[in-house]
Every structure is written in structure tokens, then in C-alpha cells.
Amino acid sequence: MKKTPHIPLTRPTMVPFNAVEPHLRKAAASGFLTNATYVRKLEDQAVKLLGVPHAVAVSSATAGLILTAKLLGLTGEVIVPSFTFFATIEALLWNGLTPVFCDCDPQTFNADPASVESLITKKTSAILAVHVFGNPVDLTGLKRIANAHKLKLFFDAAHGFGASYRGKPLGRHGDAEVFSLTPTKLAAAGEGGIVMTRSRDLAEQLKIARDYGNPGDYNCRMVGLNARMAEWNAIFGWQSLLRLPKWAERRRTLVVHYRNGLSGLPGIRFQKIPRENVCSYKDLSILVNPEEAGFTRDNLADHLKAANIDSRRYFYPPAHKQDAFKKYLKKKQRLPITDYVSTNVLSLPLYSHQKVSEVKTVIRVIKDCYRRYSGRP
Ligand SMILES: Cc1ncc(COP(=O)(O)O)c(C=O)c1O
């Protein structure tokens, strides 16, 4: 296979340095290097962009999830998808909660409400769902279940900037939604997260909790963390959020190129985005059906690699098969859809400033994989 110039899976789309430089200077001159003016600007921009009343910036989405789970006063079991990134599960475990793994939907890859409902016991206190790859989860279905069983409901929206559900951006649902600003996300602060909530009380508690639990008088009110965001990160995050709509649109255009280029190829299908929603495409994920394609997901990943193109088996293995978490799978419990999706899923290169020519190269190399495995020239 002829090598192409290296195509990475993702790259952070950076704000022009001259847009951040004066602010970096200002922050340095102010002497306030963390949780100050630029963190407020970032929070205000998130409120404006998402149309949700409260934003609390934190050092990472993981920290935001840990603090949110703590402040919601959860106990016992929390239902969570196994098809997610490990931080979702870890946030529960840091709170001494038991993750109960639900299965996912074979089309959307998101938590399947029927599976969630079947796992509710007397010990269940909450549902923590994930907008997988920026595809909004079935919020209506999950809200109905949470209301009917009086459960807390919160969301790992780490992939959620740039996505919307029924015409409105994510961030307004359940008790809270937690976004990430790490370099693989559409808006990157370097490190960072933002908890969005409609609850003033929760937002106020989070602001104390991210500062060790100290409301300012050095009489600690709760067990908190140092989960503050530095001003440097906030400057990059704020400037990225200003550009987010443009970047998200660009990704959607690139995805159209991928869809057009790969449509009709046997055994490849895309994550389904319900028509009324918009996906952020934090990742562009395909499923490879080996019987129809004539090759496996791993064959395709290897073929791309040989051509100098990165891809990722993501999320693989699923959480319920990982060493740290497998003991939480209930006895005799099976997650057949999660197993299927995880075994066959592959993320293709995508980032907001990617060139269409790169997408075309990836498509060409995928088509070449069919020739290789069919034996045809
Ligand atoms: C689904 C999901 N949840 C949580 C996280 C953790 O976010 P952070 O790195 O900001 O802590 C990630 C990170 O990529 C993620 O993909």
C-alpha cells in the first residue's frame, strides 16, 4: 500500500495566537492566574452560547462529573452505559457509587432507555447518560424514566459542544450536563470542563466545591477538590467558544464528504443521528460488518495504518470488559449490543480545520481495502 502523508485521527483547531496573546499578557499582568476574570468570561460565553442559566468552569470534565455526582447526593447504584470513556465510570467510583452498566442502542450507540429501565432497583439513585461522540442521547425517554422512578439524571456531555437536541444546544437537560475542553474536543482550552445547569443552588455549590469546599472564609463546608481552571486555559477556551459555531459547521461539511464518499459500500454504516438532532461529530464513527464488507474493523484499521492514516477503535474494550470495572457487571448480565458495537466500531480522522483532500484520501484508502480483501485488482 502506497503511503500518504500522515493523516492524524484528530488535531486541535487553534484560535489564532494573536487573538489570545493580549489576553495572556493581561492575565499575567493582573497577577490573578486562576479562577478569575477570564474564567468568568468563559462561563459567560457558555451561558450565552448554550442558553442555559448557569455555567461553572472546572479543571476537567472528570472533575466536573465527580463534583456533580457528589453534590447531587447520590447513593448506591447509578445506571451508566458501558459504551463510554472510562472517566464517566471513574466519576462514580470516586464517589463510592456502584456503576450499573446498561446496554446501548445499535444505531445511535447511546444508552438504550429500555435497558436503563430494566436495571432500576431499590438501590438506584441516578442515571448518568452520555452523548456519545456528540450524538444527543434520547433525552425524552430518559427523562420519562427518571421522573417515573424519582431518580436524578445527569449527563456526560464531554463531546457535547456543537450538538443540539430538537433545535436547542445541549446543556439544559436533567440536573446538569458536563462538557469537556480537552484538545480532542471541538473547543479546546488545553485542559478544562464546564458544568451547565439550570439550578442556581447546584451552581453555587459547585463553585464552592471546585475550590476545596471553601466558600472564601476558610471554614470548609464540604469535601471538595482543587478543580479550579487556570486563566490560561480559560482564555483559549473562551476564544474557542466564540468560534465554535463556525468550526462545528465545518465538521458537518466534512462529514457530508465522508458520507457521500462511503455511501453504498457494503458493510459500512455510520452512527445514526436522529433527524431532529445535530451531532457535534467530536468523533466520526463507523461500524464495519465483516460478513458484508469482507474484512473486519481491525483489518480496516491496519490497512489505514499501513497507508499512514490513523484511526481509533473507540470505545474498545467497553467499560464492562476493562480490568478496573469488570467486577461491576452483574452476575449473568450480558451487554450484547455494546459488545457488537465495540468490536466493530472505528473512528475515522476528523478535525475542524481538516482539508477535504484528506477526507478524500481516507475514502480512497478505504475503497482500496475492499479491493485488497476481495482479491480484485
Ligand atoms: C465521554 C467522555 N467523558 C469524560 C471525558 C473526560 O473529560 P476530561 O478529559 O475533560 O476530564 C472524556 C474525555 O475525552 C470523554 O470522552
Image: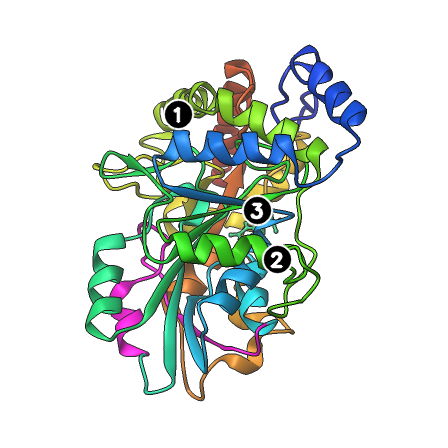
Q: Would residue 271 be counted in the magenta stretch?
A: no
- Cα–Cα span, label 1 and label 2: 42 Å
Measured as percent of width and height from the top left, residue 278 is found at 31, 34
Name the residue at the front extreme: 217
Residue under circle 1? 252
Measured as percent of width and height from the top left, residue 323 is found at 64, 74
Q: Amino acid at mark 2?
A: Pro
Write the residue at 56% across / 19% down: 353
> Is 136 positioned to the left or the right of 1 in the image?
left
Circles 3 and 1 in contact, beta carbons < 8 Å: no
Measured as percent of width and height from the top left, residue 159 is found at 48, 43
Residue under circle 3? 299
Q: Amino acid at mark 1?
A: Arg
Residue under circle 2? 215
Q: In this orientation, which residue lies closer to the viewer: 279 or 345?
A: 279
Q: Amino acid at mark 3?
A: Asn
The mark that comes first in sequence, 2 or 3, is 2
Q: Which residues are magenta?
A: 95-119
Write the residue at 30% across / 41% down: 273
Position of 153 relative to 350 (above/below): below
Write the residue at 52% across / 80% down: 328
> Is 125 positioned to the left or the right of 353 in the image?
left
